[in-house]
């Protein structure tokens, strides 16, 4: 019988903990499950993984496997350890051991089947089929993608690439369900996160931004161009509007059954006094508005 290295089959060290074995098994079982992987050899690999897990996940079976495996080498045939009560195996130099009353033959999985009962696992033989599990992940999108809707190509942790539809108006914290893309055929829930935007901040469905205006626009009133996710719009400023004042653009936030609004905060920016003429002009303003107290 050729030696089967169950540790190698799962890609773990012989000192692997039960948790490490379980993690490795789940990953490989999901990767090679015949319902998901139609590649040539995937089903055989799935059976091999199940067989290895059946032995290594059971403390008694694993102990027996480790004891028997001490006398095994890759490419050699089985030599029973001292105390083995039956079976006849051959080494490269001839037969050893006593007679085999049961006429045992077959591979190592058959040996364990005879020792512990049951099949080695796999398809069509009472093997273990992993239970479907929903899994979660985070998808970071832009405010523009939420505002307009669209499609995003996403690479899953499994390495698979999918085109994910982004619903128009989806908000942060909401999820998109991808049927059958989770663990062992379960669903994958993608939780939405928004990337930082250079102009806007988001609260619920409402957007906010700061718009800078000149002192004379603030004092006299003006019509200024304001950015929104849907494009530039014209905003009429009333005369005398002060810095810090907020104005509302109805329905210019994220779309939805009740669309959000966009909040505009006014910031008054004064020109620099870069020349003597500029300084003289500011001096005239100071004289003209000598009674004005901006901190009053």
Image: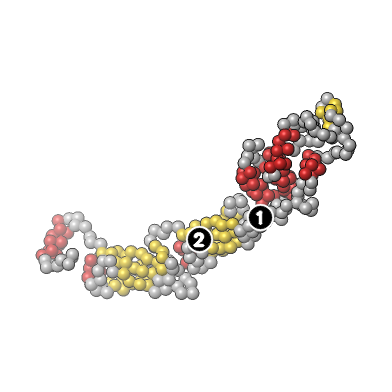
Q: Which residue is mark 1?
A: 184
Horizontal arrangement in the rendering, residue 200 relative to residue 28 (left or right): left
Q: Position of residue 253 (x, y in %)?
A: 42, 69
At numbered mark 2, what does the secondary structure look like: helix, strand or loop?
strand
Q: Identify which residue, 192 or 10, lies in the foreground.
A: 10
Residue under the point 52% across and 60% down: 191
Horizontal arrangement in the rendering, residue 20 relative to residue 85 (left or right): left
Picture layout, residue 145 above or below residue 54: below
Residue under the point 26% across and 66% down: 243
Picture layout, residue 141 above or below residue 46: below
Is residue 56 visible in this depiction of the protein?
Answer: no
Q: Position of residue 139 (x, y in %)?
A: 52, 57
Tell which circle, 1 or 2, labels the residue nearer the N-terminal end. 1
Locate the C terminus and report the quarter of the image it occupies.
Answer: bottom left
Q: Few, some or many C-alpha atoms within 10 Å of disc 2 (few <14, some 14-19, many ≥20)?
A: many
At numbered mark 1, what does the secondary structure look like: helix, strand or loop?
loop
Q: Nearer the viewer, mark 1 or mark 2?
A: 1
How many numbered dots are placed on residues in this image?
Answer: 2
């Amino acid at each position: 019988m050729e030696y089967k290295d169950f540790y190698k089959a799962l890609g773990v060290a012989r000192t692997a903990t039960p948790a490490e074995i379980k993690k490795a098994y789940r990953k490989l079982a999901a990767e090679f499950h015949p319902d998901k992987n139609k590649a040539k050899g995937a089903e055989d690999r799935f059976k091999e993984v199940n067989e290895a897990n059946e032995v290594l996940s059971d403390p008694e079976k694993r102990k027996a496997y480790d004891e028997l495996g001490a006398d095994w080498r890759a490419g050699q045939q089985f030599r029973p350890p001292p105390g083995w009560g039956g079976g006849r195996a051959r080494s490269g130099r001839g037969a050893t051991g006593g007679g085999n009353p049961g006429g045992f033959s077959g591979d190592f999985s058959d040996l364990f089947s005879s020792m512990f009962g049951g099949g080695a696992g796999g398809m069509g033989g009472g093997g273990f089929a992993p239970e479907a599990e929903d899994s979660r992940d985070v998808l970071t999108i832009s405010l523009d993608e939420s505002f307009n809707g669209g499609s995003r190509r996403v690479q899953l942790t499994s390495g698979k690439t999918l085109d994910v539809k982004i619903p128009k108006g989806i908000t942060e914290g909401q999820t998109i369900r991808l049927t059958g893309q989770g663990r062992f055929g379960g669903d994958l829930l993608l939780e939405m996160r928004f990337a930082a935007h250079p102009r806007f901040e988001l609260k619920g469905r409402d957007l906010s931004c700061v718009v800078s205006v000149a002192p004379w626009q603030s004092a006299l009133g003006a019509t200024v161009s304001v950015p929104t996710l849907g494009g530039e719009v014209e905003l009429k400023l009333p005369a005398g509007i002060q810095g810090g004042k907020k104005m509302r653009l109805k329905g210019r936030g994220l779309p939805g059954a009740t669309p959000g609004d966009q909040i505009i905060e006014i910031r008054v920016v004064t020109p620099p006094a870069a020349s003597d003429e500029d300084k003289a002009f500011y001096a005239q303003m100071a004289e003209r508005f000598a009674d004005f107290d901006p901190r009053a």
